[in-house]
Image (cartoon, helix red, strand yellow):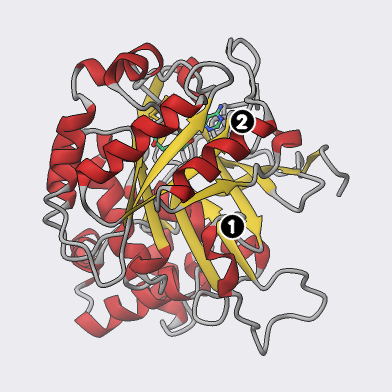
Amino acid sequence: MTSGGKLDTSILDAGRPLRGTGLFGLQNQQLSEKLGEFHLPAWRIRQLETALYGQRITAVDQITTWPKELREQVQAAGFRVGLPEIVETFRSIDGTERYLIACADGQTVETVWMPEGDGAEDDDSALEPTDAPSGRTWTRATLCVSSQIGCAVNCQFCLTAKLGILRNLTAGEIAGQVAAVLNRQQAEPGRDRINLVFMGMGEPFLNYDAFMDAVRLLAGPMGIPESRMTVSTSGIVPGILRFAEEPVRPRLAISLNAPNDAIREGIMPITRKWAIADVIEAVRKLPLRPRERVTFEYVLLGGVNDQPQHADEVISLVRRANFPAKINLIAWNPGPGVAFTMPDPAAVDAFQQRLRAAGVPAFVRRPRGRDIYAACGQLKKTMD
Ligand code: SAH
Ligand code: SF4
């Protein structure tokens, strides 16, 4: 592997659609229906589920709890696992890895692996795994997962927006990104501390059903606690209202990015549809778990929203919201064709101090993998 370079170009199944019916991504009942012709008892389906999501097998032949004949029959009928495949890896000098992962139709999606957390506030939570493979340099990691190919929301500062929306990902493609990367890293959710952030390409709440189906697979048979997942939304009010009703759900982050509607409209046109007050009203419906806080993400854009008076407006906004909240400040990451400037480091510091002095918890997110375009808002298909 070379830092910052392209890797793994040999596995070029991407571009060639795979034939057959993929099983990965289907829930218990759906597996049972799809394999109806085999009249399998419930415990055989449970074995399949364990193999797909617990062991993260890549081929039907690896379902070792099934007799060989059954595996052969299922394969002969055209069924396959259908796990998305990593086709390209970019490695940053800071250890972050960005992957291009190929879906069955040959489209690629981006996923980011950040060993040792993302530099946010949870950094004090290191757990030393006792039986991790030797030579490993990380003790915990955060995976940044995509929910769509491209994005329709069109935030002016975001590189993903330049793609437009190409398509929604399926539940299997969302959970499959996690499975593919865990396999690559030999990570085990039961042993290693794995956090998921749904902050890759796309707006999760504009692909709500597939996104939540993926969450249920991840929190259920894949074994990642929902409390270690965070979903970020640009403020899709109907999505937030549905989310508030979910019995199993990640933590919530709102991309606020501006202190008022006027500035937000200029950088996030979605504000014309749902104003900041509408978003906050919807978030209020969310029943928070003990010690849970809602995160407001705030991308600092040089000269646009990074001044002391903006910090003061954010303080009163958070006070008016009056629910447990914290602010994650992100210095804007540059991208080609995106006409903003990075904030002055002194302005970032002053902004954080001003919030903290007013009693508003504020953290600065360390950019990860900027050199390989893996940082927030830099994900864009780069395989062509
Ligand atoms: N679509 C969702 C989740 C993906 S974006 C959302 O917008 O919330 C994840 C985070 O990256 C958002 O908070 C977004 O505001 C931020 N972001 C986008 N472009 C960025 C850039 N160029 N630099 C820094 N952060 C960016
Ligand atoms: Fe889409 Fe999020 Fe980028 Fe906005 S910031 S365009 S919602 S991915």
| Local secondary structure at mark 2 | helix
Using the rendered image of the protein, determine whether residue 41 is visible from the camera's viewpoint. no
Quadrant of residue 183 within the rendered picture: bottom right
**Residues at marks 2 and 1 touching, judged by CB atoms closer than 8 Å:** no
Name the residue that disc number 2 marks.
347
- The residue type indicated by label 1 comes to Val
Query: Residue 337, relative to residue 125: is it above or below?
Result: above
Query: Residue 355, relative to residue 377: is it above or below?
Result: below
Q: Is residue 118 found left or right of 238 in the rendered image?
A: right
Using the rendered image of the protein, determine whether residue 345 is visible from the camera's viewpoint. yes
Q: Is residue 134 found left or right of 351 in the rendered image?
A: right
Q: Tag count in the figure? A: 2
Residue 108: x and y in percent read 54, 34
Few, some or many residues within 10 Å of mark 1 (<14, 14–19, 20+): many
Query: Residue 351, relative to residue 156: is it above or below?
Result: below
Quadrant of residue 139 within the rendered picture: bottom right
Q: Which residue is drawn at 62% across and 47% down?
A: 86
Residue 52: x and y in percent read 42, 68
- The residue type indicated by label 2 comes to Ala
**Cα–Cα gap, marks 2 and 1:** 36 Å
**Quadrant of image for the C terminus:** top right
Residue 258: x and y in percent read 38, 26
Q: Residue at x 70, y 36 (%)?
A: 370
Q: Residue at x 61, y 71 (%)?
A: 187
> Which circle's residue, 2 or 1, is located before the other in the chain?
1
Name the residue that disc number 1 marks.
181
Few, some or many residues within 10 Å of mark 2 (<14, 14–19, 20+): some
Q: Which residue is drawn at 58% across and 27% down?
A: 381
